[in-house]
Amino acid sequence: MSTSKPATSAADWHLPVGAHYLGPHDPNETLNVTLVLRRKNPLAALGPSPSRSARHADFEARYGADPADMERVRAFGRQHGLQELACEPGRRTLHLSGTAQALQQAFGVQLGHYELTPGGTPYVGPAQAPVLPDPAVIAVLGLDRRPVAKPHFRIAKAKPATTYTPLQVGQLYNFPAGTDGTGQTIAIIELGGGYTQADLDTYFSGLGLATPSVTAVSVDSGSNQPGGSADAEVMLDIEVAGALAPAAKLVVYFAGNTDQGFYNAISQAAHNNSLPCTVMSISWGGPESSWSTASRNAMETALQDAATLDVTVTVAAGDDGSSDGIKGSTPHVDFPASSPSVLACGGTKLLASGSTISSEVVWNETTADEGATGGGVSTVFALPSWQSASKVPAASNGFVGRGVPDVAGDADPVTGYDVRVDGQNETVGGTSAVAPLWAALVARLNQKLGRSLGAANAALYGVASTAFHDITQGNNGSYKAAKGWDACTGLGSPNGQALLSALQATSSSPAPTPAPAPTPAPSPAPGHKHKGGSHSPPASSGKHPKGKSPT
């Protein structure tokens, strides 16, 4: 028997840079996996529905998994001795459980233990891409348990001279008067960390606000577990969104930091009929090129589901400039911010004189090791029609791709947000603050418009000339700010009241059709290929005064 590992396609699979093989995984240990299936029909816009529950039912009937597809895949699981944990045709998911040995035989992989850095936390992963058991299966998630994302927040290294409460930022951005998010639900996706009720009560009381409604939802093995470094992310998201949309309900989905956890959190939030959201905020992501093709495409289908169900998804664009933290001169963008189904949120440095913006430039504090806004051009997702007039440059390999970000807001920790984390007052920045900022603004716009913006990009690009503060100074490394859209701050930061007026004037326009699923290139883009790390697995046997109320 050959002891070499099976050949794999570099286009479909790569180990993370620096991944080091530690040894085989216990063949008797039980693992859970999620199979994501194709839709029964090509995705298109849904018509008006009398209620959210009716809209979800209509979506499932049209775009859920085909019953014949689902039954074949369920039979495959039984054939390999895998236990069915749940079957959700509307979400197109089948959740299975089995021993590592059974899963290796079913999906043609070798599971081993790896570490990304010497002495780092080990994770379980396969040495090759899983073999998809049926044409109906898009991806098998959960065999690869590497961390797929990191939170995009930056804690200021020293107390800055200028800080803001979220209310003050909302005032500077002219959030529409007479709105507070009433009737809206904001889903917040977290891949670690947690919050305490005592911290929330103390923080919102200090702003002169009642603590908003916050519900924690466990996804798979994730849960609200305060006490770690990711708490700053969770608290920042809740405190920014809750301060700026205090009457909205906040539902925080806690999942594990894996492709399986990330997908299931987004999918569950989008399809949750008992807690239906109108906005979703995501402050986690990883370089687009670091994702496996199948995992990234599965994620995109979940984001498309959300957009079709009239959920606006706001996503942080990253805090490591145009490189997205990858060494070398080639620019990279962050995913899921690079998805055409989301509103990608970049960062600025915001200075004010009283209640007026005096200066706003691209966030770039790399010389002081305080981060810089992500932004650039996708090498996976094609240029969307609503960006066709934005003069998005070609990607480094010549690909005509989706430009990132779409919008921006204050993110520089040097002009950061006053928040409370684990009993301490902190100044925090990062594009992680911009995603919940825009989520709160969308909730308030929805409230006043009497409808959900849903896939908002086409509408926002259509009114960009009158509703945004155009950022024209600064750079994020490879890209410079310019008049109009740019790959640092997108269309710019919001003028909330002007944005509302512009959207009201175009409220009779039809909703945009969601973008089709991407067709990945047959091979990695030049300069974007990750080489596998070292491994040798054996053959498998199978200062402003605090505000008191939102404007």
Image: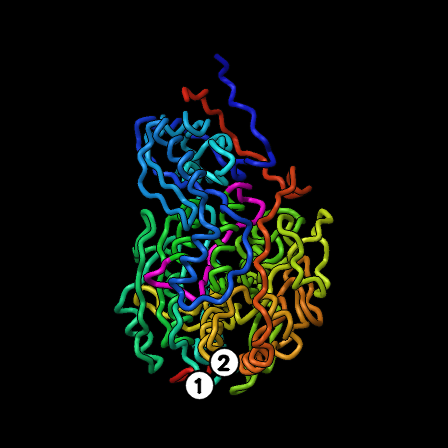
Q: Give the residue number, with chain letter if any, for mark 2.
A: 175
Residue stretch rendered in magenta on the structure: 272-294
Q: In this rendering, is residue 219 above or below 198? A: above
Residue in the picture at 66% in, 68% down: 474
* Residue 63 or residue 5, whichever sits in front: 63
Q: What percent of the width, then of the height, locates residue 444?
A: 46, 76
Q: What percent of the width, then of the height, locates residue 247?
A: 36, 76
* Residue 212 or residue 45, whichever sits in front: 45
Mark 2 Cα within 10 Å, few/some/many (few <14, many 20+)?
A: many
Q: What percent of the width, then of the height, locates residue 357?
A: 57, 82
Q: Which mark is residue 165?
A: none
- Callout 1 secondary element: loop
Q: In this rendering, is residue 32 above or below 347? A: above
Q: Nearer the viewer, mark 1 or mark 2?
A: 1
Left or right: where 519 falls relative to 94 = right
Q: What percent of the width, then of the height, locates residue 403?
A: 64, 59
Q: Amino acid at mark 2?
A: Phe
Q: Give the residue number, with chain letter if any, for mark 1.
A: 178
